[in-house]
Image (tube, rainbow, N blue to C red):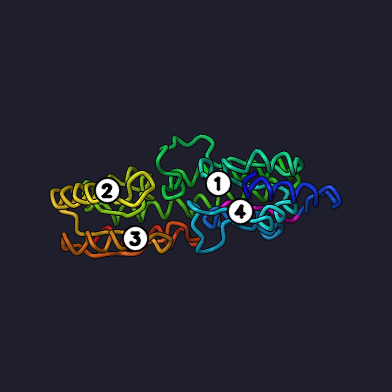
Amino acid sequence: MNRFFIFLFIIFITSCSSKEEASKNVLSVTMEPYRYVVEAVAGDDWEVRSIVPKGGNPETFDPTPGDIMLLSESRACFLVGGLGFEREWKDKVAVLYPKMTLVDTSRGIERDAGDPHLWTSPDNMIKIADNVCNALCKIDSTRSTGYHERLVKLKDSIYATHAILKRKLEKAKGKSFLIFHPSLTYFSSLYGLRQISIECEGKEPSVAHLQTVIDAARAQGVNCVLVQAEFDRRSAIAIADEIGARVEEINPLSYYWHEQMLHIADVLSK
């Protein structure tokens, strides 16, 4: 029996002797950008908790028994949709906590199988916000007016950010950039950029792949290599040195979605 199923067994035994009633004031989300969206729509009546902590890597995250236990206090859990660990535990959690609503916020979004970072596109963020609002209205219809009012304000803010990003990236359209972990697929598609990934199918790149990346970067005039704190940056720095490009750090996992999107645009527009 692997560690995850042992966790579930312990939690099941514990939950049998505890109250099954979920807190009416707690919501959970997979990660920090979704905490931002849910808080913006839900308002002050709810406490919103992230399963993946600030600075955590959702690609390698493995929930502890404590993480799963905390979900027992939540009225709903908002999922990114498509993350590896979500697929691993969501069906089991649904059995453990049948009164908790699991919400797939990716509904209506055309997904790229190789990149779960849906929220890096403002267009997707609008749909995510709509899905959050619809779920909250079903969970607590008495506050639906407030949810819709806050949704309108949030969408206005997202549209405003999109307008700024479009303006900042206008001159960069058609250009390429290197990134260690391919987290800007949706961002690049929306703004007409070309993303070249150093990481190969979720693994450290081979020597042959690195050479292919270097050749492509030179051919396309790449002058920027993006890295994230959660991933090893050694190969990215080596490539940047080889092609004479600068290295810039981004954080698509940040709670501060607007600020981070503008930071990424500023980096790529140089």
Within 10 angstroms of label 2, few (less than 14), some, or many (20 or more) residues?
many
The Cα atoms of the two marked residues, 3 and 2, are separated by: 12 Å
Magenta stretch holds residue 221: no
Work out whether mark 1 precedes mark 2 in sequence or the reverse, and give the earlier one: 1
Query: Which residue corresponds to mark 4?
Result: 63
Residue 27 covered by magenta stretch? yes
Q: Relative to 32, is 135 above or below? A: above
Check if mark 4's residue and mark 2's residue have beta carbons within 8 Å.
no
Q: Earlier in the sequence, mark 4 or mark 3?
A: 4
> Can you say whether 101 is above or below 11 in the image?
above
The outermost residue toward the front is 1
Residue at screen point 42% across, 61% down: 251
Residue at the image point whose x is 82% and y is 49% from the top: 21
The residue mark sitting in front, 3 or 1, is 1
Q: Which of 11 and 45 lies nearest the eye of the viewer? A: 11
Q: Amino acid at mark 1?
A: Phe
Q: Are marks 3 and 1 in contact (CB under 8 Å)?
A: no
Q: What amino acid is labelled 2 in the image?
A: Ile
What crowding class fits label 1: few (fewer than 14 Cα within 10 Å), some (14-19), or many (20 or more)? Answer: some
The secondary structure type at the circle numbered 2 is strand
Q: Which residues are magenta?
A: 25-30
- Mark linked to residue 85: 1
Q: Nearer the viewer, mark 1 or mark 2?
A: 1
Q: Position of residue 144 (x, y in %)?
A: 69, 45
Marks 1/2: CA distance?
A: 25 Å
Residue at 51%, 41% (x, y): give it: 82
